[in-house]
Image (cartoon, rainbow, N blue to C red):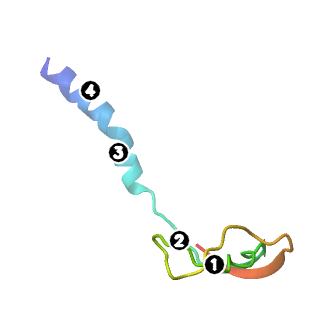
Amino acid sequence: MKKLIIAIAAILSFPFVHAQQNQSVVREYKKEFKTYGFSDPDPIARMGNIYPYYRFDGYTDKPSVKEWKVV
């Protein structure tokens, strides 16, 4: 019975042991993407969480190419 418990524990722990051996790689670079900016702000400042700042509710329909940082 003891050997069976040890065998089951070894089988169940194998994926965790294997996962610890993999290394992660993180890269950071810049890439250009087609970007749609915000539309013109609502000229009337509304009372609420963001008062007294303008509110941007939409996006423009004209894209521009902008460089972004990609991780």
Q: Which residue is mark 4?
A: 8
Q: Which residue is mark 1?
A: 44
Q: Of the two numbered discs 3 and 4 on the same chain, state the one appearing first in sequence.
A: 4
Q: Is residue 64 left or right of residue 40?
A: right
Question: What is the CA distance from the residue labelled 3 to the residue labelled 4?
Answer: 14 Å
Q: Of the two numbered discs 2 and 1 on the same chain, state the one appearing first in sequence.
A: 2
Mark 1 closeness class: few <14, some 14–19, many ≥20 residues within 10 Å:
few
Q: Of the two numbered discs 3 and 1 on the same chain, state the one appearing first in sequence.
A: 3
Residue drawn at (40%, 56%) of the image: 21
Question: What is the CA distance from the residue labelled 4 to the residue labelled 2?
Answer: 35 Å
Give the numbered dot on residue 26: 2
Q: Position of residue 32 (x, y in %)?
A: 77, 78
Q: What's the residue type where badge 3 is placed?
A: Phe
Dot 3 falls on a residue whose secondary structure is helix
Residue drawn at (61%, 74%) of the image: 55
Q: Depth check: give the residue in front, 27 or 11.
A: 27
Mark 4 closeness class: few <14, some 14–19, many ≥20 residues within 10 Å:
few
